[in-house]
Amino acid sequence: AAEAAGAATVEEAVAAPGAGAPPIEEAPAAVAAPPPAPSPAELSKRLQEEVPDPWAALSDEDAYEKVSGEAWDSVIEGLCFDAAAGTGGAHVIAKGAELHDLSSASGAFPGLAVSLDVSENAFERVEALPALWLRDLSLASNPLSSLNGLSVLFPKLLAIDLSFVDIPSIDGGWAALADCPQLRSLVAESAGVSSFEDMPKLVSLQNLELLENEIEEVDEVERLAKCCPALKRLDLRENPLVTEPFYLKAVAKHLPQLAWHNNQSTKKYTAQDAAKGKVHVNFDAEVNAVDGLFKNEGCSCIEGNPCIDPVTCIDWEHREAVAAEARRKKGLRGPAGEFM
């Protein structure tokens, strides 16, 4: 009987496999993959079809003049705002906020921003930004490894700041800048630039600021002139080549059209210019000299000698004209009797 009972038990176990064993857990349902992020071309298309350009009425030259003078219609700090936060073309500041992706930004932001400062963040790719009607963009001090999509996301871009971004290490970095046909200004302080050999033609570039880079050879000036035929302002201070003996001659030869060079006007004003009213000279302007080195100093322009430091100057931009007018008023003349 016992053997029969045992056999029955075995038969039951065979007939019902898994009896007495823990239940088998079902595999979790597969999670649907998120849809792919829209491409820069798709974002740009949406921008042009759905978002009015706040500076549509301005020409590129008028817009660049406003950018150069920081003449924004409004200034907005941070990205949490609505349409009531500003009017017209806004300068949006979102620096030092540990941002790394804004590609899905929406709301009033795309319809207001014409200038965006996202410096000192964590952006590695330009494609992590939304398409915007930007004329001015600061990506300074971001760990950028790609500028792909720059011209597509920002079809109206006129000025960009890439200071403290290693431009030569970015694959296709110079080419991405050259793809921006209206680009007027490039600021790239301490950006690892040592040569213009890889720079393509930037046909519209008027302002180039490359302070504290690594350019050594005077021959680079000729290369730069070929790459930037429209250049009007150049700042290469704190680069090794500026101390080379023939540097200034090379600039005068290859870039004769410069109006500003190394933060100084290249225009030579004369007393006759000032006398004819070509330059407004404000002799009553106040000088805010600092304590210490400049404590007892005043503006030497009013004595006939152009100032060498803007801190004590009443009109730094027109210091040559101020000094020329002062010499004329004092009656100072040269050997041939001309006003000095």
Image (cartoon, grey):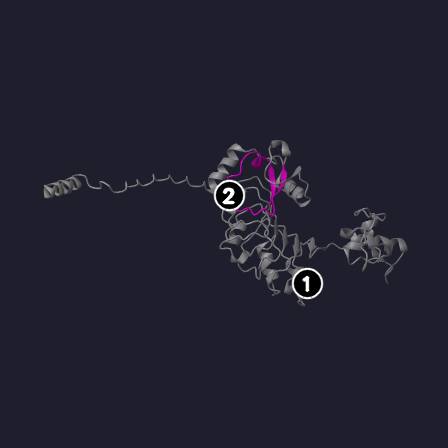
Residue at the limit of the structure toward the bottom, as seen here: 245
Q: Tell me if 261 is positioned left or right of 44 in this view.
A: right
Q: Which mark is on residue 152?
A: 2
Residue under pointer 1: 248
Compared to residue 221, the image places residue 49 above or below, namely above
Residue visible at 83% across and 55% down in the picture: 301
* Residue type of the residue flagged with mark 1: Leu
| Bounds of the magenta segment | 89-117
Which dot, 2 or 1, sits closer to the camera?
2
Compared to residue 128, the image places residue 216 above or below, namely below
Where does residue 308 sit, x and y in percent of width and height? 78, 59
Where does residue 209 sit, x and y in percent of width and height? 64, 54
Label 1 neighbourhood size at 10 Å, few (<14), some (14-19), many (20+)? some
Residue visible at 78% across and 51% down in the picture: 318
Q: Secondary structure at mark 1?
A: helix
Verify whether residue 199 appears in magenta.
Answer: no
* Residue type of the residue flagged with mark 2: Val
Position of the N terminus, as image quadrant, is top left
**Which quadrant would residue 234 be assigned to in this image?**
bottom right
